[in-house]
Image: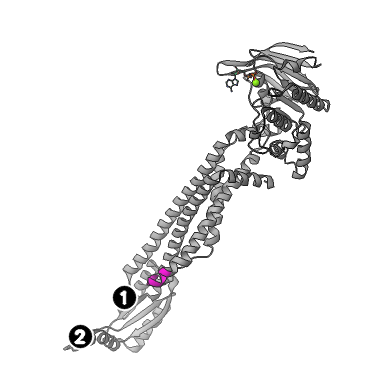
Amino acid sequence: MDNIMISFDGVSKTYGHNPAIRNISFSIGKGEMSFLTGPSGAGKSTLLKLIYLAERPDSGTIFLDGMETEMVKESQVPWVRRKIGIVFQDFKLLPRTVFDNVALTLRIRWMHEDDVKPVVHETLKLVGLRHKADSYPAALSGGEQQRVVIARAIVGEPSVLLADEPTGNLDPDTAAGVMRVFREINARGTTILVATHNRELLKSTGNFIFRLDGGSLTEEMFQ
Amino acid sequence: MGGYHLKVAVSEMWRERWINLLSALSIAVGLFLIALAVLGVYNVKIVTKKLPERFSITVFLKDGLSASEVQEINRAIRKNPGVKTLTYTSKEDALKDLKATLLDSDYVMEGLEENPLPASIAVGLRRDSVTDSSVEALARKIEGLVGVSEVEYGKKLLRVIESVRKGSEFAGGFLISALSAALIFVCYSTVKILFYRKKEEIETLTLLGATRWFIRAPFLIEGGLIGLGGGVLSSLAIAAFVYAGYRKLAASVPLMGAFSMPPELLYWMPLTGLCLGVAGSLIAIGRIKF
Ligand SMILES: Nc1ncnc2c1ncn2[C@@H]1O[C@H](COP(=O)(O)OP(=O)(O)OP(=O)(O)O)[C@@H](O)[C@H]1O
Ligand SMILES: [Mg+2]
């Protein structure tokens, strides 16, 4: 258990009468980088939501860093979430500048303003958006917005990074650049789970790939 | 709460400046009305306290009392706390006064063989001891003294003054609480609207690991600043009202000469606005779920 970061044990989640996750069990070790794939509607986003406590399972147990998620009290949720960096499929950017969006992750943790600035600029440079710091998300391209979301997710150096379709709006070169950043972060010890149907990303990655279909885990392979 | 929250609050306020301005104005109007009610109650109190200064009890004496008996009555009345002055009017003086009042019509008095008027003592009272019940008790006591035939005092006037004071306090209190509730509602609905508009934003903040107070802080600052702004506006309005409009009124209406404003009102209003704003925001935000 000590070296397991995420583990699912017989987890199911149903929306109304629509089962999104059916009796899933798997585990991801600390410091690993894994992929989650499967067709649209397979339940990838739902699985990630279960990890970051946005959804609660109907049955089964989920462990995050040795802690059972169902046991987490509501008042503790913010502290659990601060360990997780999330790249949302629908971005969830606020109508503030790029800088302020990325800085939010740090300000929420009460980091001193003097320290916020260099860290945010460093991270924006990493995703190639240093020059867009003062722009508003509405004035950015889809790919640029997606990289702001990635910067916001990694700026706090989380122990877990959950990326939901992080390259959905990126051209192959930019996508490759983002994956390089992920590997760099992964090399520094962050556990990463990427949900994607981008086959390019899955080629010869040297990682675990979980395939979901209709809410069930149909394949688990190492490539 | 730090500079960051203040910055967010101010930039959000600017983004929603029209709705905020309208709220601040409604708060200003509400606080202005509250201040008027306070001024009303305050001044009725002052006026009703001043009126009884001219108020006295008149004690009519029986005929044929000796000087020492009158002295005795004088002494007995003076013993009572609340008695300020005693003025003796003899039968002869009373007649003279009456004749002076009647002037040319003093033929009424012709053919009168003996002086029908009684001697009397006017008892002046201290302002603070004049209330409905205390005066009545004093009158009863004096009535019981030997040599006193009758005691007269403005019973009805006292009752009226007392009920005016109580009535104004009640009406003022009612008005003030109703208006305060209305003001809290204004702050509440303003923040509620802003809150609903930012529902998604708040959800995102919770997903990023923000605590409840981190999320609430800008809203509380916003509500507080709106209330404070309204309070300052109403302070300016009431100051203008008192120093410009009312001075003219006081010059023409005699009773208004007593009218005044407690200066504390000028800083109490912004303070009240601030509290109402924060209270309204706090209610509007309610529980944040994770
Ligand atoms: N909030 C919700 N309420 C009801 N049904 C939902 C909700 N969220 C997801 N679902 C349903 O659950 C199933 C799984 O959805 P999910 O978003 O996890 O799929 P996904 O694998 O992420 O798809 P995509 O690749 O298109 O993002 C779908 O059938 C979807 O309609
Ligand atoms: Mg999805």
Q: Separation of disc 1 and disc 2 at Cα?
A: 28 Å
Q: For residue A5: magenta?
A: no
* Residue A15 against residue B120 in the figure, above or below: above
Q: Quadrant of the C terminus of chain B?
A: top right
| Residue A9, quarter of picture | top right
Circle 1 crowding by C-alpha within 10 Å: few under 14, some 14–19, many from 20: many
- Say which label, 1 or 2, has the lower sequence index: 2
Is residue B2 shown to the viewer in this render?
A: no
- Per the image, the residue denoted by label 1 is B151
- Per the image, the residue denoted by label 2 is B105
Magenta segment range? B248-255
Give the percent coordinates (x, y) of residue B90: 31, 87
Ligand 1 quadrant?
top right
Judged from the image, the secondary structure of the residue bearing numbered disc 2 is helix
Give the percent coordinates (x, y) of residue B242: 47, 65
What amino acid is found at the position of numbered circle 1 in the picture? Answer: Val
Question: In this orientation, which residue lies closer to the viewer: B2 or B197?
Answer: B197
